[in-house]
Image (cartoon, coloured by chain):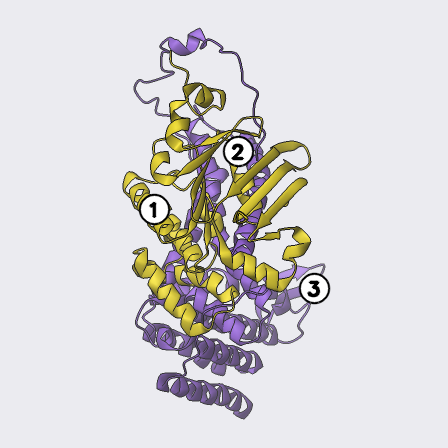
Chain colours: A purple, B yellow
């Protein structure tokens, strides 16, 4: 922006600024310590997002099985496997499918512990909480195998059909999430976007996804900078209320910044000839490994569904 | 009959949000092959003028002619005219973060040539040559958020050079760069100008001015042009530099 302040008459520097000031407590520690507020933890989590992205970039650069496949082949075949998993009803078949994702993780040189944690620590647990009520005899009738007590004179407990249904859903979600994690950690983000284009996902949608991912890091950097600038000027402990006020104020400032940045990004695109139709550099190369993988994926999907129907 | 200037603005007025004036009656010509510097303090309208010259902002009043035709918002809606104009004039933004928006450096450099409608083989060749020329080939598959400020600047310049425009607009090209990168950039600008490119750059870096420009125009804080002339003459006029907030008053 270009608002210019009018030339001001010289104002002498305030006297207190030119005089030394006794430090508030440049002395021994008091022994009182204060842990970081939730704002600190939130900002640290922002750094965690960047770490996770770097982990994914490193994993995608490994010379593993899935990394060697063309992204479009990988996307289509893993989507096919996802559909197959969603059709499977039998728990043993789901266990086999989940075990297969672990084998793929190993063949793709992903750290198995981190892979399993990523899947089990978040989504299936939440899914478990969601399906928990359905295990009770109040909702799913059947033989109570885990009695929990009584409620208004009724015996309450988990039924065998309820537990089976819950296990089926949790296993299916865990397998599906594992497939999605395999896809996203073994494929560079740019290749994944190109693969989406190959699947005829609208160009504008893919472009917006790409730009959003790119500027996520920029905005996270801005958040961290704003917080660090504040922390550098905060003398003494910080309470939760002032932390919340800071979050509210910085959200507004960040919105303003992101709006300004969005305008500049759009201008930079227009300056280079963008008129609403982005083109990308991408060449589709189907190699022997890709063909072999397609065959394996088709057979595996068919086997999963066939085995499920046969059991 | 004298030939028409390459770029010509006449009595330009522009105000942000209709309230904050940025240009208040600016007239200027840019001749083919010259290096012109727009000098001025922060907020005097240099960046706004560059955006008008690049057809990104359109004046509230006044006219802008480029390559023999008047540039207007409705005129640039015509695809052929838009493509012709955009391929002849390139803009390197001050904020490289805004300019480097693609997922990888390679795609960033390819963006402009692809929008120009060049075939894939030529785009690949241009990307390859430009990355090599700016010494950023090892960064080709890197994401922009993994780059340093100087690397981002190189990528931003590469993304425009790959389009091979006749006119290059630079907004504060040497700002926030380390001395080695500054030196490299100055040499590049001089080399591009020697190859026939017209250069227009906005700066308030007086130290590098004689290297970067054959002619300079000085913006006053009233958003009008205060003076024009060779850099050496303008730099010698201490009163002018004081009035336009480009030099410190000696104590």
**Residue A213 location in percent, x, y?**
49, 57
Q: Which residue occupies the foreground of this view, A306 or A21?
A: A21
Question: Residue, x 53% and y 92% (percent of image)?
Answer: A310
Q: Earlier in the sequence, mark 3 or mark 2?
A: 3
Q: In the image, are marks 1 and 3 on the same chain?
A: no
Q: CA distance from mark 3 to mark 2?
A: 48 Å
Disc 2 and disc 1 in contact, CB within 8 angstroms: no
User: Label 2, on which residue?
Assistant: A243
Find numbered disc 2 in the image and state the secondary structure of the residue it sits on: helix
Q: Which residue occupies the foreground of this view, B41 or B96?
A: B41
Find numbered disc 1 in the image and state the secondary structure of the residue it sits on: helix
- Which chain does tag 2 point to? A
Choose mark 2 or mark 1, whichever is in front.
1
Q: Which residue occupies the foreground of this view, A153 or A111?
A: A111
Quadrant in which the C terminus of chain B is drawn: top left
- Residue A132 visible here: no
Q: Residue furthest bottom?
A: A310
- The circle drawn on residue A154 is 3
Number of residues whose C-alpha sits closer than 10 Å to that of mark 3, classed few (under 14), some (14–19) or many (20 or more): few
Question: Residue, x 67% and y 37% (percent of image)?
Answer: B17
Q: Give above or below for A108 relative to B177.
A: below
User: Label 1, on which residue?
Assistant: B190
Number of marks drawn? 3
**Residue B175 location in percent, x, y?**
39, 38
Number of residues whose C-alpha sits closer than 10 Å to that of mark 1, classed few (under 14), some (14–19) or many (20 or more): some
Q: CA distance from mark 2 to mark 1?
A: 51 Å
Choose mark 1 or mark 3, whichever is in front.
1
Q: Give above or below for A194 relative to A258.
A: below
Choose mark 3 or mark 2, whichever is in front.
2
Disc 3 and disc 2 in contact, CB within 8 angstroms: no
């Amino acid at each position: 922006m270009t608002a210019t302040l009018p030339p001001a008459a010289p104002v002498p520097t305030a006297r207190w600024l030119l005089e030394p000031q006794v430090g508030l407590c440049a002395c021994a520690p008091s022994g009182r310590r204060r842990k970081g507020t939730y704002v600190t933890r939130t900002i640290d989590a922002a750094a965690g997002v960047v770490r996770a992205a770097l982990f994914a970039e490193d994993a995608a650069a490994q010379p593993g099985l899935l990394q060697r496949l063309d992204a479009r082949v990988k996307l289509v075949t893993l989507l096919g496997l996802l559909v197959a998993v969603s059709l499977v009803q039998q728990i043993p078949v789901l266990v086999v499918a989940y075990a297969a994702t672990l084998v793929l993780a190993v063949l793709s040189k992903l750290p198995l512990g981190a892979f399993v944690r990523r899947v089990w620590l978040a989504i299936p647990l939440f899914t478990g909480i969601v399906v928990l009520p359905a295990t009770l005899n109040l909702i799913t009738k059947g033989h109570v195998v885990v009695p929990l007590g009584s409620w208004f004179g009724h015996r309450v407990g988990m039924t065998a059909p309820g537990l089976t249904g819950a296990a089926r859903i949790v296993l299916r979600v865990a397998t599906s999430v594992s497939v999605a994690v395999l896809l996203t950690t073994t494929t560079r983000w740019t290749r994944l976007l190109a693969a989406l284009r190959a699947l005829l996902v609208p160009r504008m949608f893919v472009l917006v996804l790409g730009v959003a991912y790119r500027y996520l890091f920029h905005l996270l950097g801005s958040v961290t900078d704003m917080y660090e600038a504040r922390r550098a000027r905060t003398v003494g402990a910080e309470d939760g209320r002032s932390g919340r006020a800071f979050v509210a104020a910085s959200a507004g400032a960040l919105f303003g910044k992101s709006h300004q940045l969005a305008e500049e990004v759009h201008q930079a695109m227009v300056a280079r000839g963008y008129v609403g139709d982005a083109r990308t550099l991408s060449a589709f190369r189907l190699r022997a490994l890709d063909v072999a993988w397609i065959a394996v994926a088709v057979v595996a999907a068919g086997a999963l569904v066939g085995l499920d129907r046969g059991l | 009959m004298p030939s028409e200037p390459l770029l010509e603005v006449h009595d330009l007025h522009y105000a942000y949000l209709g309230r904050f004036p940025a240009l208040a009656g600016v007239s200027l010509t840019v001749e083919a092959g010259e290096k012109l510097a727009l000098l001025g303090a922060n907020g005097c309208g240099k960046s706004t003028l560059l955006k008008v010259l690049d057809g990104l902002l359109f004046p509230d009043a006044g006219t802008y002619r480029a390559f023999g035709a008047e540039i207007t918002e409705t005129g640039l809606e015509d695809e052929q005219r838009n493509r012709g104009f955009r391929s002849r004039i390139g803009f390197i933004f001050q904020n490289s973060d805004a300019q480097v928006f693609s997922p990888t450096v390679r795609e960033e450099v390819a963006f402009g040539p692809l929008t120009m409608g060049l075939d894939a083989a030529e785009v690949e060749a241009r990307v390859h040559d430009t990355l090599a020329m700016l010494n950023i080939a090892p960064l080709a598959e890197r994401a922009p958020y993994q780059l340093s400020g100087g690397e981002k600047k190189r990528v931003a310049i590469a993304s425009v050079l790959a389009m091979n425009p006749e006119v290059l607009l630079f907004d504060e090209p040497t700002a926030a760069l380390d001395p080695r990168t500054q030196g490299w950039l100055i040499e590049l600008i001089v080399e591009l100008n020697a190859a026939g490119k017209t250069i227009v750059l906005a700066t308030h870096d007086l130290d590098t001015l004689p290297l970067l420009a054959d002619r300079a125009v000085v913006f006053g804080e009233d958003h009008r042009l205060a003076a024009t002339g060779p850099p050496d003459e303008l730099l010698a006029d201490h009163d002018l530099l004081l009035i336009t907030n480009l030099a410190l008053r000696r104590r």
